[in-house]
Image (cartoon, rainbow, N blue to C red):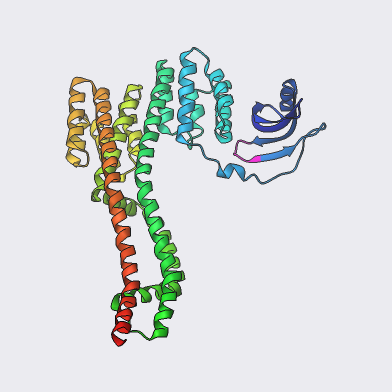
Amino acid sequence: MAIYEYKGVDASGKQIKGVLDADSPRILRLQLRKQGVYLTQYVETTSTGKRETKRSNTMEAAGTREVEIRGAFQRIKLMEIAIVTRQMATLVRAGIPVVDSLNACVDQTDNPKLKKVLTQVKTSVNEGAALAGALGEHPKVFNDLYVNMVRAGESSGTLDIVFQRLADFQESQVKLRTKLVGALTYPFIMLLVAFAIVTLMMVFVVPKITEMFEEMGAQLPFVTRMLIGSSELFRTYWWIAAIGIFVFQWRFRKWSKTDNGRRFIDRAMLKLPVFGDLFRMVAVSRFAKTFGTLLASGVPLLTSLEIVKNVVNNVILADVIDSARTAIKEGAGIALPLQKSKEFPPMMTHMIAIGEKTGQLEEMLKNVSDAYETQVDSRVSQLTAVLEPIMIVGMGVGVAFLVFAILMPMLQMNEVISGAS
């Protein structure tokens, strides 16, 4: 059974579009005709992901291949997946079968790309596949964490609870990401504004002033000569700087994808002044939240650690988690390898050790996650409060230097003219 994105016209002449699964274009046309829709165009998604757009008429749809670029600019946001997950939790809890629940989510989803993925999942489940297996066919949308939790929920009969936990987890990740982006947006905008001001001054203002001083034959102060020299250098060799930046960025990206480059960058990120602690807190909070959610959903311990290793998004911390996984295979606990590495905070390793001894590891991980999420919120607020005046002072110093370099020779010339008169 294929998946079709279609466009049509209803009895009132209104344009209709949507997604349906059908055995053939003829069946698709019959299904739409029963709904009072006249098919005008459809796009079939093949098993390889290729799309073929065809125009339809009263005869069998004949085809002209078209290049579809719309899908290249579509992306599925984490919040959209979280909304679908919460809808699934509500529907499954109400006793609605999985296929019908998926069908309801397809109807309520606005994103065409996500709608198509959910339709393909529904088709696979309808043909007898397990829900986790159907979701696993779309790794770019549903990651290992999602698929393994759903598989555990199917095995234990707690699919509604698993979907609820997944939705809570995804929403917390979106909330944390939004806070970090919000904290860094203001400084980034300030830097762009400062760069734009300096560029305009160097390209348009300074050259005019230079011409005026040269006509007067005045001896310029050192600060002014330095500013004029910088302006001339920027105007003459800006293309070299642009090429240099492009080459550096290309080489840096290539190097950062190597094992040594990734390790160097991740270690440097953790050792950065001020921001290093924040990055570590975010990673620790994500580790505890994900690990606790997986264990509470019935995912095996070793499988959970294998998934969490990729969630922290830091090679240094991932190596520590991998060593903990190896230690568990040999009969040791989780807390000791984390503590020996000194990469994870002592409070966290202490609470994990207590959770292992008392059999309340999931609860302890939840407490760790909540504690570090609170610390991240507090640290982000502090950084925002500190960065604002620092950026303002920095811009003020830069503008003051430009003004001083421009006005200083003018004041000297006024003094010379006043003394001569």
Q: Is residue 3 left or right of residue 151?
A: right
Q: Is residue 209 among the parts visible in the rendering?
A: yes
- Give the answer, above or below, for where 28 lies relative to 402: above
Identify which residue, 95 or 232, lies in the foreground.
232
- Give the answer, above or below, for where 205 lies relative to 76: below
Identify which residue, 229 or 414, lies in the foreground.
414
Magenta residues span 46-51
Q: Position of residue 263 (x, y in %)?
A: 30, 50
Q: Position of residue 20 (x, y in %)?
A: 65, 27
- The number of numbered discs placed on residues in the rendered structure image is 0
Quadrant location of residue 13?
Answer: top right
- Per the picture, the main secondary structure of the magenta-coloured stretch is loop
Q: Is residue 4 left or right of residue 11?
A: left
Task: Point out the image quarter for the N terminus.
Answer: top right
Q: Position of residue 140 (x, y in %)?
A: 48, 38
Quadrant location of residue 168?
Answer: top left
Q: Residue furthest top?
A: 95
Q: Is residue 13 left or right of residue 416?
A: right
Quadrant location of residue 171?
Answer: top left
Q: Residue furthest front?
A: 421
Q: Is residue 322 among the parts visible in the rendering?
A: no
- Give the answer, above or below, for where 200 lies relative to 103: below
Q: Is residue 47 left or right of residue 179?
A: right
Reply yes or no: does residue 47 show up in magenta: yes
Q: Position of residue 421 (x, y in %)?
A: 32, 86
Instruction: Please tell me which residue is depicted at 28% across the width and 51% down the height of the picture.
Output: 389
Instruction: Please tell me which residue is depicted at 34% across the width and 76% down the height of the picture.
Output: 410
Reply yes or no: does residue 406 show up in magenta: no
Instruction: Please tell me which residue is depicted at 45% across the width and 23% down the height of the picture.
Output: 86
